[in-house]
Image: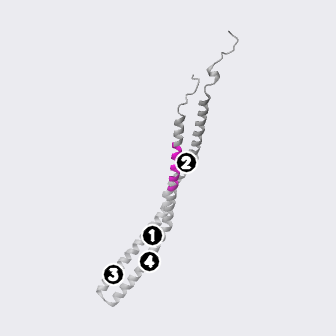
Amino acid sequence: MADRANISSVDALRAFKASLIVYVSKARPTLEEVSAEAMRTRLWLENDQRTHWEGQIRRRRKKLEEAQEALFSAKLSNLQDVTVAEQFAFRRAKGAVDEAEEKLKRVKHWSREFESRAEPLTKQLGKLHTVLSNDLLQAIAYLTEAANTLDAYSEQGPSPTAANPTPPEDGIN
């Protein structure tokens, strides 16, 4: 049995601790950015896009009504050339309204779908955040304590009883 522990990797322990600190310092902001991006995407879908396409529908319906009125007026005046142009404008306005309604329908669908698709991933992000915030910080503290303990042990040197062992006193010479 050795008289003394062979401590040769305290520097490796410190290097690992330093790498762990760098990892935590880079991973936490990245994780927070991903969480914030998911929240921004949800708000963008639920608010910005819905508002945008509802406004587009209103504007496009107004243009459709104007094109419909112009087409009706052209039909009443029996001008064939104007009627073709007016019919084209009406069809284009109708297509624009249909497109906006379809886009709003998709936005509503993905607003509902986003939570069910993103929820499992955000739960995993939360677990990883807990590991980074709690477990890895405790690990860093433990590594610091272990390195300090090993340094103190190596500075002590061998114990005096290990260097000069005394014979047992059993009364027999």
- The verdict on residue 14 being magenta is no
Q: Which residue is mark 2?
A: 132
Dot 1 alpha-carbon crowd within 10 angstroms: few under 14, some 14 to 19, many 20 or more: many
Pick whichever, 23 or 88, lies toward us. 23
Placement of the C terminus among the 4 image quadrants: top right
Where is residue 26? Give x, y as percent.
51, 49
- Cα–Cα gap, marks 3 and 2: 63 Å
Q: Which residue is mark 3?
A: 87
Where is residue 5? Give x, y as percent.
57, 27
Give the amino acid type for the residue marked by disc 3 in the picture. Gln
> Which residue is at 30% across, 88% downward?
79
Circles 3 and 4: CB atoms closer than 8 Å: no
Vertical side of 64 occupied by 131: above or below: above
Dot 2 alpha-carbon crowd within 10 angstroms: few under 14, some 14 to 19, many 20 or more: some
Placement of the N terminus among the 4 image quadrants: top right
What residue range appears in magenta?
19-33
Q: Which residue is mark 4?
A: 59
Q: Which residue is mark 1?
A: 104
> Which residue is at 51% across, 56% downward?
33
Where is residue 93? Give x, y as percent.
38, 77
